Image: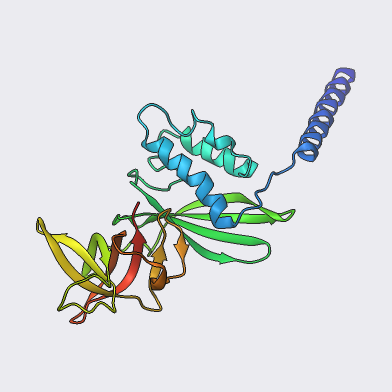
Amino acid sequence: MKNKKVIIISLLVVIVAALLAWFFLKGSFKQEVSMNDPVDVVVDFYNPWLEAVQATSTDPYTEGLVDNPFLSRELKAKILEAKNNPENLIDPVLCQTVVPEKIATRRVYRNDTEAQILVTARKSESTEQALITLLALDGGWYINDIKCTPGEFGPPQGEFTFEKEGFLIKGSIPAPFNPEYWHIVFEENGQQGHVAPIFFKSETVCLDGDGKENACNPDQLSEATKVFVRGDMTEAGVNIKRFEISK
């Protein structure tokens, strides 16, 4: 009986000590935040991650990118758990089974306490995407979670009737084209010099050279800029659905 009491007391001491240690560690941890815009917080984490994944001599874990101070502790643990799972075939950050050449970001929403940003593969038919949730804290933002989910932003093959990379031209375009409108000069079947007028619509999604979504402003475009255009071809030209500036 005495031995049982000793064991119980010892167990209680161990439990209390563990609880005290847990509360101490929890109380001593302070989540760091970035004062940048949520989109920039995501881009600053994702671009180095993509570069490390693409590299042949290193990887994101060797580079210590999981230790980014603007990630929550839970997210860091989640990423490491996925890395150590031999059955996991998808990158837990990019949420892609095939490493993309480039990525794009798109704001889903933002309010005073939370924001969500979507990251997709650029110039890809992949429908895989990463949905990043950021939380507000002390006037800044940190990445709280990443969820890999299929989505509608990577269009299936054949959805658009026009998908071309080329260069912009407007005022210097020769007749019979109208210099009042932007045009894309592209290659078709190995032949250069094909031209199509392009038209921005209210539903057009525009991405800058870093893959960030911005308001479409055709007046700020420059001739000879390399772009990737997706849209629907009509008799008048291309009604743009997605407009990406290429680096």
113 with respect to 132 (left or right)? right
> Which of the pair 120/139 is nearer the observer?
139
* Rendering coords of residue 148 (x, y %): 45, 52
Res 238 → quadrant: bottom left
The residue depicted at 53 percent of the width and 46 percent of the height is 44
In the figure, residue 110 lies in which quadrant? bottom right
Of 183 and 134, which appears nearest the observer?
183
Q: Position of residue 14 (x, y in %)?
A: 81, 26
Q: Is residue 208 above or below residue 196?
A: above
Specify whether 150 is left or right of 234: right
Q: Tell me, yes or no, if residue 92 can be seen here.
A: no
Q: Residue furthest top?
A: 3
Q: Tell me if I can see residue 106 in this picture.
A: yes
Q: In this view of the protein, which residue sits in the foreground, 94 or 171? A: 171
Residue at 24%, 60% in the rendered image = 166
- Nearer to us in this view, 53 or 91: 53
Q: Is residue 153 left or right of residue 158?
A: right
